Image (cartoon, rainbow, N blue to C red):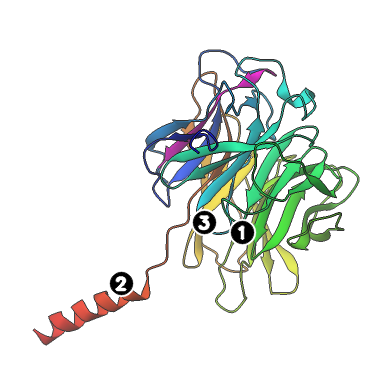
Amino acid sequence: MLAAVPMVEAAAVSAGNLVIYRVGAGSAALGTAAAAVFLDEYTPTGTWVQSIPVPATGATAMTAVGNATTEGTMSVSGDGSRLVFGGYRKAEGATNPSTDTALVTNRVVGMLGLDGSVNTSTAITDSTGSLRSATAASATSSIYLGTSSGVRYVAGPGAAVTSTVIDTRNSRQVVQSGGILFAGNGSTAITAKVQSYGAGPTSATVGTAVITLGTPDAVNSFWFADLSPTVAGDDTIYAVNQVNGTILKYTSDGAAWTASGSFSASAAANVTGISSGTGVDLYVTNTNTLFKFSDTTGYGGVIAGAATSILTAGTNTAFRGLASFPVPEPTVGVLGLMAALVGLRRRR
């Protein structure tokens, strides 16, 4: 049973901390060869907490192309219990895994749990090209992939599973929000750079445009926030236009999405955020740097400015995607206890 579910386990990860998908062990320059992957935990101020290694050799290996700036994007599972990411079943130091067919070099979906466990047991045998991202509702649910050959669907985790094409266009990050599948893309054939595919698609689906830009643009990563108490579900998107290094804000009124400004972050590739009430702290990575930008304008507010650097990658390593486990909302029981304690103090 244990052999069937290979895991690496470290210390527990703190909700609200950042986890960065880092490529490279630091001992050799990064190129097209398969490179080791580490999941580095930092506090929101950029203080290092721990590095969790992903297996780099053997039957459970999951590596990345060392210099591929569109790989390694991370997402939070729909139930908030896992951080989801992708890679290749090829040993560190071997030739470029993205040029192999998926039958020769399986594409791998990795999941990090709050307890620090890393599961790399899901291997896809038929998706071609580069695996950029993955997302899932839970550790046991169906999985969606963002690949250079399109958005793809996998019925569930497994050691040798196949996928179904949802959209053949060049895809970047895939995200599920409110049960709806969204994907960013870098296809120069269309202007719809973030699209919605509806709830749980399992076959070819025509996407509906959410963010429309110029054909040369590419949305590599995006993150949802819920900032309005009057709009159901997530109502704000922060998206990285990787072509010009800007982070775009879009706001939904429940029916349509409209632009709400942008800010710059040099060579930005990936974005995540931590929200508190109506404010959001955004964290952005490029190959070498972790940036921070605080958006205090709230729901529908127009942002502007530039991000501030708070962390630099080490020699012969590179930052890719990043994500954060959501901080649980206070339970009714806890709130009731707090109210009781306040009342007790007042009675005294």
Name the residue carrying label 1: 224
Q: CA distance from mark 1 to mark 2?
A: 27 Å
From the viewer's perspective, is residue 315 above or below residue 150?
A: above
Q: Amino acid at mark 1?
A: Phe
Can the viewer see residue 191 in this picture?
A: yes
Q: Position of residue 255 (x, y in %)?
A: 74, 74
Q: Which label's residue is closer to the chain start, 3 or 1?
A: 3
Name the residue: 39% across, 48% down.
14
Per the image, is 40 magenta? yes
Q: Which quadrant, please, contains the C terminus?
A: bottom left
C-beta proximity under 8 Å, tags 3 and 1: no
Name the residue carrying label 3: 80
Q: Residues within 10 Å of mark 3 (few under 14, many from 20)?
A: many
Name the residue: 60% across, 21% down.
35
Say whether residue 56 is left or right of residue 209.
Answer: left
Say whether residue 296 is left or right of residue 45.
Answer: right
Front residue of 201 and 280: 201
Name the residue carrying label 2: 334
Q: Residues within 10 Å of mark 1 (few under 14, many from 20)?
A: many
From the viewer's perspective, is residue 112 above or below residue 347?
A: above
Front residue of 121 and 185: 121
Q: Amino acid at mark 2?
A: Val
Q: Position of residue 97 (x, y in %)?
A: 72, 23
Name the residue: 55% across, 76% down.
229
- What kind of secondary structure does the magenta stretch mostly adopt? strand
Per the image, is 250 magenta? no
Q: CA distance from mark 3 to mark 1?
A: 13 Å
**Region of the chain picked out in magenta, as a range:** 32-42
Q: Which label's residue is closer to the chain start, 2 or 3?
A: 3
Say whether residue 134 is left or right of residue 211.
Answer: left
Mark 1 lies on a secondary structure that is strand
